[in-house]
Image (cartoon, helix red, strand yellow):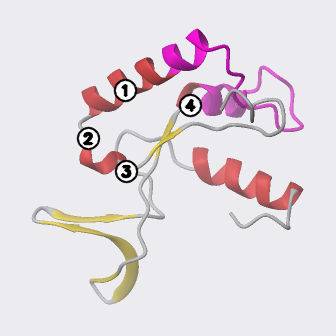
């Protein structure tokens, strides 16, 4: 990351965050941000062609590192097929932010990256 942070925007994420509790996610976020700071790595700070103090930018900054859920598995939920992970207690859909994530945070960043750099596979 030390060699990349001058060339690209680094957006730290916590993958498979559905396997962690809220407390574990908060603790891991704090630890990741401390490691990034200790090593002098610059990360993407949420400047997206808007004023720096807009609520959306603050929301994005506060969400980093973003806790994400992804899956390539198609599951039958009700009468529709969704990508997600099946657990004994239910299904976590990869397109839906679940209870401790703010809706649209990560999707807004991905959309912005895709629009600005359409040649990237997001």
- Give the labeled residue for mark 1: 28
Q: Which element carries disc 1, helix, strand or loop?
A: helix
Quarter of the figure with the N terminus: top right
Mark 2 and 4 residues: CB-CB less than 8 Å, in contact? no
- Give the labeled residue for mark 4: 64
- Give the labeled residue for mark 2: 20
Label 2, label 1: how far apart the Cα atoms are:
10 Å
Label 3, label 2: how far apart the Cα atoms are:
12 Å
Mark 2 and 1 residues: CB-CB less than 8 Å, in contact? yes
Front of the two marks 1 and 4:
1
Q: Which element carries disc 3, helix, strand or loop?
A: loop
Image location of residue 91, percent across then percent down: 25, 67
Mark 1 and 4 residues: CB-CB less than 8 Å, in contact? no
Label 3 neighbour load within 10 Å: few <14, some 14-19, many 20+: some
Q: Which residues are magenta?
A: 33-61
3 or 2: tag closer to the N-terminus: 2
Front of the two marks 1 and 3:
1
Mark 3 and 2 residues: CB-CB less than 8 Å, in contact? no
- Give the labeled residue for mark 3: 98
2 or 4: tag closer to the N-terminus: 2
């Amino acid at each position: 990351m030390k060699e990349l942070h001058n060339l690209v925007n680094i957006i730290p994420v916590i993958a498979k965050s559905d396997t962690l509790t809220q407390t574990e996610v908060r603790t891991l976020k704090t630890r990741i941000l401390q490691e990034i700071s200790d090593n002098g790595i610059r990360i993407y700070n949420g400047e997206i062609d808007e004023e720096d103090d807009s609520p959306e930018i603050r929301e994005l900054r506060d969400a980093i590192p973003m806790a994400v859920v992804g899956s390539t598995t198609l599951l039958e939920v009700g009468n529709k097929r969704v990508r997600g992970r099946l657990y004994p207690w239910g299904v976590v859909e990869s397109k839906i932010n679940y209870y401790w994530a703010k809706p649209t945070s990560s999707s807004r960043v991905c959309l912005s990256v895709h629009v600005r750099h359409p040649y990237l596979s997001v």
